[in-house]
Amino acid sequence: MPYRAYHLLLGLAGVVAVAVLLLLRADVDAQARRGPRWRQRILVAGILLLAAFGLGPACKGGVTPKPRSYSNTSGLQTDPGTHAGGKAPRPAIQEAAYRDTAEWKQIQYVLGEAEAVASGKRGSYPFDRAGKKQLLAALQKAQGNADSLAKKKLLALAEVGLLKVDLAQLRQRVNGFRPTEMRMATCYEKKSIPYPAELSTRRLKLRLPLLKQLAAAKRLHPVVVRKVLVRVEKNLNTLETPTEVSKLNQAAQADARKLVTEVRVALTSVKKRLDKPPVTRAALSGDPRWQQVVAFWRYITPLAPISSKTTTTQRKAADAKKKLAEAAMDGLVKAGALTAAEAKLLKAEANRLRGELYRSPPADQRVDCYDQMRLDPARVSLGRLQVRLPLLQKMVAAGRVKPPVLTRVLPAVRRDLKQLTDPKALQPLRPEERKKAAALATQLKAVLARLDALAKGK
């Protein structure tokens, strides 16, 4: 079925479903946020079609729900709470002002669709030619809608600027996917792929002026800011990873170090203006949110080592469970049941497991152009441990640890440490990398010993 016809029929079916729910006096917004994904998609399409004709507010809530497959939208589910100093009513009204607009709903919808394609969740051929053209046009329209929100003074110029940068990046990634008509075509000619640090440098240079504007803005919309900061931090983490920056030439390394300093200062200034929940201690074992984290680990742990034998359905299920687990971790951090460092370690390990799961093509899909990348295990372990060591040191400095968290994150840390102490595994590394590996291994052994002692109550 052509892509346009599919969405038209989906929208009409959604309108009928919305009408039925309204006749039954049901909360359409609430119904669209719960239940099976297919029902959510139908109701989303119906609400969007009604919104296009100016009938969106007829649905209770007036906020377009998002299918569960969307990524990086956990911060958009709820508005920030009241500040300790009071004066929360005005920001709350302003939040509703932009969230009820057709422009914001279209931006949210197209971000979800584009992220699903760019992340690979829709497969190697996520659309036909007409569908690809339609999605690219929608991304372009979202850029205009972002400008419209700025002209209406519903969003700050810096917020809109960051949104537009993200939309442009997503458009570029979506454009790299081939339509279904090209499924049987020969592979693309191999091209030189930039290092991750090069890409992150380019992206942060675009975002730095906007971050500075955010830091100086009179008022921020926390749910928008938190959404756009996700990619900023991701790229910043890349430039703060020595193994990635070391691949650049000397001039580029100096440029990256200077950029990291400037971005970190601006980012810290912005974050200070966002609400931060108080850090308290709470038990994990009986918390339903922690059980979601455990459920993800139980599901993906036996599948990750047998990547080539897993199916597309299993991978989609793992992605869904990972998304729920990450949302649960965020909730635990806000409730004070987990520290930020612990949550980051858990998420880093979750990303590693997902990477293992997707290492090979799925067993039920034949992909002729799937090239497996050969990476030296010791170099990969070095990069991972350089990111994890500061977080582990923070846990030691806190003086208290949670055994359930250690059970999840330390096995992978110990495996990586084993790579760094294996002379045979270290042979492919450069001399300077071997020195870094030796120093890191020494530090890590001391930290692990201290964590073991804390876990035993010593």
Image (cartoon, rainbow, N blue to C red):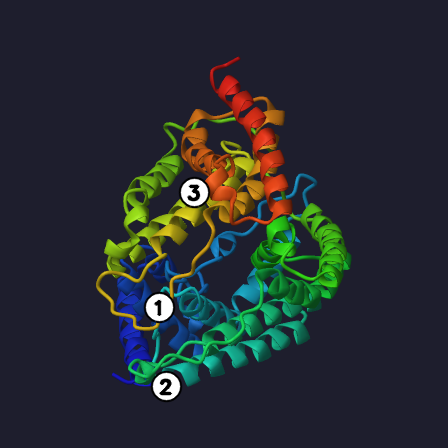
Q: Residue furthest left?
A: 364
Please name the residue that numbered disc 3 is placed on: 328
Q: CA distance from mark 1 to mark 3?
A: 33 Å
Tell me: 36 left or right of 77: left
Q: Amino acid at mark 3?
A: Ala
Q: How many marks?
A: 3
Label 3, secondary structure: give it. Answer: helix
Residue 296, placed above or below residue 184: above
Q: Residue 155 is drawn in which quadrant?
A: bottom right
Q: Is residue 102 visible?
A: no
Is label 3 or label 2 in front? 2
Label 1, secondary structure: give it. Answer: loop
Residue 298, placed above or below residue 161: above
In percent of width and height, residue 331 lies at 47, 41
Label 2, secondary structure: give it. Answer: helix
Q: Amino acid at mark 2?
A: Arg
Q: Earlier in the sequence, mark 3 or mark 2?
A: 2
Is label 1 or label 3 in front? 1
Q: Earlier in the sequence, mark 1 or mark 2?
A: 2
Q: Which disc, if any, is residue 129?
A: 2
Camera-nearest residue between 293 and 438: 438
In percent of width and height, residue 232 lies at 62, 58
